[in-house]
Image (cartoon, grey):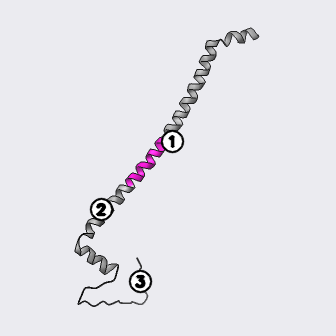
Amino acid sequence: MLTKWRNFFTPARVVFIFALVYLSLLLGQGIIQKRNLDAEKKEVENRVAKQQVLKAYYQRTLRLLGQDWYIEKLARTRLMMVAKGESAFKIFSAGIKEEKD
């Protein structure tokens, strides 16, 4: 019985079996790494897309801040300022709550 196993496990077969096990482990790790990298790539692409949207918003806002009418609009709405010669009135209505920004 022992000679039967000795004949089966020749040095060439042992090396071949170790090579198969090594390659299967190596391939398995490669597949896991590829999945992780694909997930990370999608996450980075999503972050880049969000940053591009923010960049477009800030560029538009910056372009608008260079225009006088927009600055005047911001001063009137956010800072409650009035132009020279104008009077400001605040009207209160019963039952309606004032909205805050």
Judging by the rendered image, the residue that carries numbered circle 2 is 59
Q: Rounded to the nearest whole Å, what is the CA distance between mark 2 and mark 1? A: 34 Å
In the structure shown, which secondary structural element does the residue marked by tag 2 occupy? helix
Q: Position of residue 89 (x, y in %)?
A: 32, 90
Magenta highlight on residue 39: yes
Q: Rounded to the nearest whole Å, what is the CA distance between mark 2 and mark 3? A: 32 Å
Please report whichever mark, 3 or 1, sits nearer to the chain's N-terminal start: 1
Q: Give the position of the N terminus as an image quadrant.
A: top right
Magenta highlight on residue 63: no
83 on left or right of 38: left
Judging by the rendered image, the residue that carries numbered circle 1 is 36
Mark in front: 2 vs 1: 2
Q: Position of residue 60 (x, y in %)?
A: 28, 64
For badge 2, the amino acid type reads Gln
The crowding category of the residue bearing disc 3, from other C-alpha atoms within 10 Å (few below 14, some 14 to 19, many at least 20), is: few
Judging by the rendered image, the residue that carries numbered circle 3 is 98
6 on left or right of 78: right
* Residue under the point 33% across and 63% down: 58
Q: Rounded to the nearest whole Å, what is the CA distance between mark 3 and mark 1? A: 50 Å
Mark in front: 2 vs 3: 2
The crowding category of the residue bearing disc 1, from other C-alpha atoms within 10 Å (few below 14, some 14 to 19, many at least 20), is: few
Please report whichever mark, 2 or 3, sits nearer to the chain's N-terminal start: 2
Q: Magenta residues, as a range?
A: 35-49
Q: Position of residue 32 (x, y in %)?
A: 53, 37
Camera-side residue: 74 or 4? 74
* Residue under the point 39% across and 56% down: 50
The crowding category of the residue bearing disc 2, from other C-alpha atoms within 10 Å (few below 14, some 14 to 19, many at least 20), is: few
Name the chief secondary structure element in magenta.
Answer: helix
Q: Eyeballing the image, is 27 above or below 82?
A: above
Please report whichever mark, 2 or 1, sits nearer to the chain's N-terminal start: 1
For badge 1, the amino acid type reads Asn
* Residue under the point 56% across and 25% down: 23
